[in-house]
Image: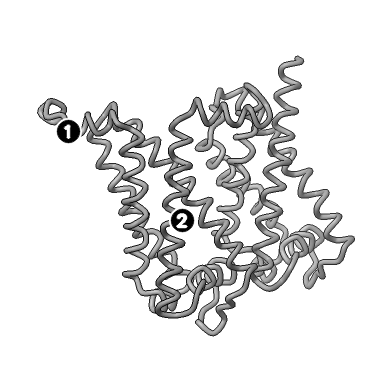
Amino acid sequence: MLTLSRRVRHGLVGGLLGGFVLAVLFYFYDLGQGRPLQTPAFLWGAIVSRSEVEPTAGIIAGFTVIHFAVWGGLGMLAAALVRWAGLPRNVLIGALYGLFVCSLAFYIGLIRTPSELVLSAPGWPAVFFGNALAGVVMFTHMHWVSSEPGVVGVMNFLKTHEVTRHGIHAGLLGAIVVAVWFLIIDSILREPFYTPAALATVLFRGAPATGRVDIALAPILGYTLAHFAFFVLFGVTVSGLAKQATRFPPLAFGILILFVVFEVFFIAMVAMLGGWILEELAWWSILVGNVLAALIMGGYLWRAHPKLAERLTSERIWAD
């Protein structure tokens, strides 16, 4: 009973941490839209079936209590699922839990909301990304406290889990390469930081025209946060595939396929949310930036997994 109680408590704390990360993310999301605290005000209006809710201090405080209560419950539910279904407490399961379970809870909460109000809800890319990130934080916390809590536990986790460590490093390298590439392109062709501002406009506002691109700190910072978080998740995924490819070398082709799918998905997503941006940024600049990132990430992971190089260059493997 004591062990179960401890697990539930860890789930509660993990849920609260995930809720906090989500709150911070949507704070910058609202700043990027030029409407501070609009999301909690909208969700409060959805709860009480009201429209045109102003983000007053009382409303924000009331919704904050509900927000953390819900995320505390989602954290305890996650702890129960880990216990009863024997699920691993890792980044992948956390992202899936946030993407599906937490996003489902969000949209269930909008069932009673009038259809005209649903149209003003946060965009689904932001909802899915935010919930996936919160799920990762939630499950990461439950994993860390299951062995050794605190900063030492984090360092030990990264030392003993080389796949995650290498993936984080590769993701950060890829994110930096793309950011520097577009800073150079923007400085030559347009104005500095135009690309992150334009992508923030598409992601956070769904702006249909170039005239609405606001090169300001808030949207650039919000998009940069999403940019680095996505590359880290992508890097951890590729690092895991590279590790598995040391046991089954043909899986290396799966990494190449994953990169191609990512490129097609990203360009299609940008075109769907704001087709004008492909004309402004030029598809070739997006492709070149991501290819450079892939080369840097691939080179790092190639050196980080020396057994992979040996396996892929072994004639016996391919002969079998």
Give the structural element (helix, strand or loop) at label 2. helix
Label 1 vs 2, first from the N-terminus: 2
Q: Position of residue 125 (x, y in %)?
A: 54, 59
Does residue 83 show up? yes
Q: Nearer the viewer, residue 63 or 304?
A: 304
Residue 81 visible to an observer of this rendering = no
Q: Foreground residue, 55 or 294?
A: 294
Q: Quadrant of the N terminus?
A: top right
Label at residue 176: 2
Q: Which of label 1 and label 2 is nearer to you? A: 2
Give percent across and percent down for residue 32: 64, 69
Q: Residue at left 33%, top 64%?
A: 287
Residue at x 68%, y 33% (from the top left corner)? 77
- Asked whether 261 or 193 is in front, the reply is 193
Name the residue type under label 2.
Answer: Ile
Left or right: residue 93 versus residue 15 is: left
According to the image, label 1 marks what residue? 313
How far is the residue under mark 1 from the one under mark 2? Answer: 30 Å
Residue type at mark 1: give it.
Thr
Up the image or down, 20 lies above or below 206; here it is above
Q: Residue 49 is drawn in which quadrant?
A: bottom right
Picture quarter with the C terminus: top left
Q: Is residue 152 above or below residue 69?
A: above
State how the image is colored. Answer: one colour
Residue at the image position 80 percent from the left and 67 percent from the top: 50
